[in-house]
Image (cartoon, grey):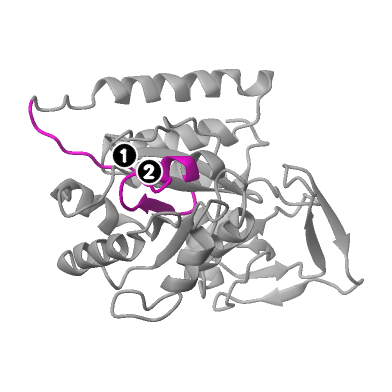
Amino acid sequence: MPANLPPQFYALSMKLKEAASNDEKISILEEMLRISPKHKGTENLQKDLKTKIAKLKKQRPKRIKGKTIYSIKKEGAGQVVISGPANSGKSSLLNALTNANAKVAPYPFTTKIPQPAMMTYENILIQLVDTPPLSPEFSPPWLKEILKAADILLAVFDLSKGNIIEEIKNFKEILDDWNLSEKKIIFLGNKVDLGKAKENLKKIRVPTKWVQYEIKPISCFQKIGLKELKKEIFDLLEIIRVYTKSHNQDLPDFEHPFIMKKNSRLIDLASQIHHNFTFSFKYAKLFNELEIHFTSDKSKIYQIFKKDSKKPQIIGKDYILRDGDVVEIYT
C-alpha cells in the first residue's frame, strides 16, 4: 500500500472491517477513493477500490414492487433534512446551498422522493436532504423515519403567503404527533424579498400558541441569510474538526479533518484512527501555535501562520479536543 496515504485512509480501512451493511461499505470505500492521492503509485489501489464498489452495488437488493420505502444513507459531517409545506422553496434552498440542480416549479409535489446533496462548509461536507411537502394530507411513515434520523431539520415556510401561520401550525402538529418536537429545528421564512413577506414576518414574530420560536428570514433567490444559515447549521451539529500529522510531516492534511463530536477526548480520536491506539497510546503533541486561515472563497487552499514560537504542548488521552486542534500521536 502506498506510504503517502493520509491517516484518514487507514482509519477508514479499520471502519470498513467493522461495517455491517453493503451500503455502509460502499460509502466508506467511496470516501477512501475520494481521499486517496491521484498518481501513478496509487493506480492499482484506485482500481481495486472501484472494483469493490461496483461488486457491492451489484449485490444491493432490488426494491419490492409496489412498496414505497425510502431511506437516505448518512454521509459527510452530518445530515440535515429540509421539510415544510408545498411551494415554500425547499428545493430552491437545496440548490442554493449545494451544487444540486433539483427541479423547481410553482406547483405542489415537484419533489416526489427524497433528494440528497452535499453542502460545503469551509473544508467539510454536510449532507442536505430535500423532501416532498409535509402536510396533514401527506405525512407518510417513511417520511417520518427520514425526519427522525436527521441530525437537524430545516423547516421552510413561504413568508409571502397569507396563510403562513396556519402552515406553521399544521407542521408543528405533525411533529408533535410524531414525537419529533424536541429535535434540533431551524425555522426559516423564505422569500423575504417578495411582496408581503416583511409584513408577515412582523406578524409571526409576535409569540402565539403556534409561533413560539424565531423564524429566520432568508431568500434563496437573492442569497439573503444563507451564509449565516451555513454557520448556524455547523454550530448546531456540535462537531469539531481535528487535524493529525505524523512525526515526519511539517504540516497536517487540512483538506481531510477528522470529524468528532464536541467534548470528545484525545483517546476517542486515537481509537478512530486505529483501534490498537486505544491500548498503545502514550501521549500526543498539540500544535496550538498553528492558526488556520481559509481563503476568501472558502476553497481548498489554506494558509498557516504561527502565532508564537512556543513548543508543542504535551497532552494525554483525557485532553478535550477543540475545533482546529492539530495533534501528533505517539504510541
Left or right of residue 327, residue 15 in this image: left
In the image, the segment drawn in magenta is 66-93
Residue density around tag 2, few if under 14, some if 14–19, many if 20 or more, within 10 Å? many
**Residue type at the position of mark 2:** Asp
- What x and y, as percent, mark residue 188? 46, 60
Q: Could you say where residue 13 lies in the image, as x and y percent from the top left?
A: 46, 41
Disc 2 + disc 1, Cβ < 8 Å: yes
The rendered magenta stretch, by its main secondary structure, is classed as loop
Asked if residue 276 shows in the view, the reply is no
Marker disc for residue 130: 2
Task: Give the residue type that dot 1 points to.
Answer: Pro
Q: Nearer the viewer, residue 171 or 267?
A: 171
In the picture, residue 150 is in which quadrant? bottom left
Residue plotted at (38% across, 43% down): 130
Residue in the image at 44% along x and 33% along y: 29
What is the quadrant of the N terminus in the image? top right
Q: Residue at x 80, y 64 (%)?
A: 291
Residue position for label 1: 114
Element on which disc 2 rests? strand
Q: Is residue 186 above or below residue 251?
A: below
Residue 253 on the magenta segment = no
